[in-house]
Amino acid sequence: MTESSLKRRGYVVRYVPYRDSAAMVRFLSEEGFCSFSVRGASKPTSKAHFLSFVLSEDEIVLSSASGGRLSYKEGRPLLLPDLRDDLARGVAFSMAAEMLSAFVRDAEGKEAYPLLSSFMEALRRGDDALTVLASFLAKTTELIGYGINVDGCAVCGRTEVEGLSFKDGGFLCREHDLFAPHPGSAFLRAVRYVNKVDLSKKLPLALPPVDSKKIIRDYLGHLETFTGTKLKTTSLLMAL
């Protein structure tokens, strides 16, 4: 049996332990997603224990057998998620990881990597966690093909908008809003902001938490409708 090695630098997005302290890890790097097995990572004394920290940034070397199955060979942690005893940051990390695992397909991994890197950098800078999470969710939704139009009416393109309907594709003008809710101009600006803001740069403003949480809930409801998947971490928003 021939065996080769792969070097990767990226983030743990899912860690699933199973028997005898072994685990399966889903990892996201510039090359995209990969999944591999690792032994002993659940043990605190293991040299591979850093892989049990979701969204840790790591350098790893994987062994690839002739059948294509990958297993962990060696590696080192570069940076662990900084929670800073901040519940909002913890929610942001947890929800971002589950979003990547639940919604983003392997074929979209290369596009997801810079988005995750920008998200992690924004939190390291100390930008508002809920605003960053709302933006990450909006951009992830666009990446997987369920994004909404925030430049104008989703039906006619008119820039004067009053309504918002995820079902109908985004912002709606007065003529086409029909039964769409009118959340107010300030909230519409907030939705446009999280879609347009560049997470790789210092955020110019932090949204009010009530707006960020509503945007997150609306997007998650939108994704649940189209994919049938509900995130377990959604309940964490209730604690904020």
Image (cartoon, rainbow, N blue to C red):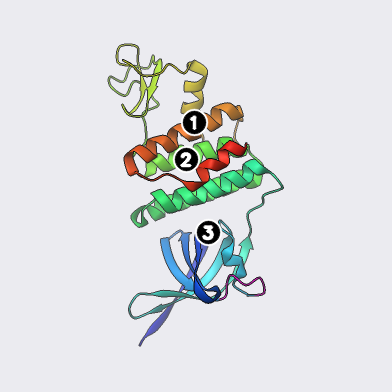
Q: Which residues are magenta?
A: 40-45
Q: From the viewer's side, name the closer residue of 173 and 236.
A: 236
Q: Is residue 34 above or below residue 92?
A: below
Q: Which residue is mark 1?
A: 215
Question: Main structural element of the magenta stretch: helix, strand or loop?
Answer: loop
Nearest to the eye among marks 1 and 3: give it. Answer: 1
Q: Which residue is mark 2?
A: 137
Q: Residue furthest left?
A: 156
User: What is the quadrant of the C terminus in the image?
Assistant: top right
Mark 1–mark 2 Cα distance, whole angstroms, equals 9 Å
Mark 3–mark 2 Cα distance, whole angstroms, equals 17 Å
Q: Quadrant of residue 21?
A: bottom right
The tag earlier along the polypeptide, 1 or 2, is 2
> What residue is drawn where x is 59% and y is 72%?
48
Category of crowding for the residue at label 1, using alpha-carbon neighbours closer than 10 angstroms: few (below 14), some (14–19), many (at least 20): many
Q: Secondary structure at mark 1?
A: helix
> What residue is drawn where x is 63% and y is 44%?
89
Residue 141 image label: none
Q: Secondary structure at mark 3?
A: strand
Residue 170 x/y as whole percent: 36, 26
Q: Which residue is mark 3?
A: 11
Q: Are marks 1 and 2 in contact (CB under 8 Å)?
A: yes
Q: Is residue 45 above or below residue 169?
A: below
Residue 138 located within the stretch drawn in magenta: no
Tag 3: amino acid: Tyr
> What residue is drawn where x is 39% and y is 48%?
103
Tag 2: amino acid: Leu
Q: Are marks 1 and 3 in contact (CB under 8 Å)?
A: no
Residue 60 x/y as whole percent: 53, 70
Tag 1: amino acid: Ile
Residue 61 x/y as whole percent: 51, 73
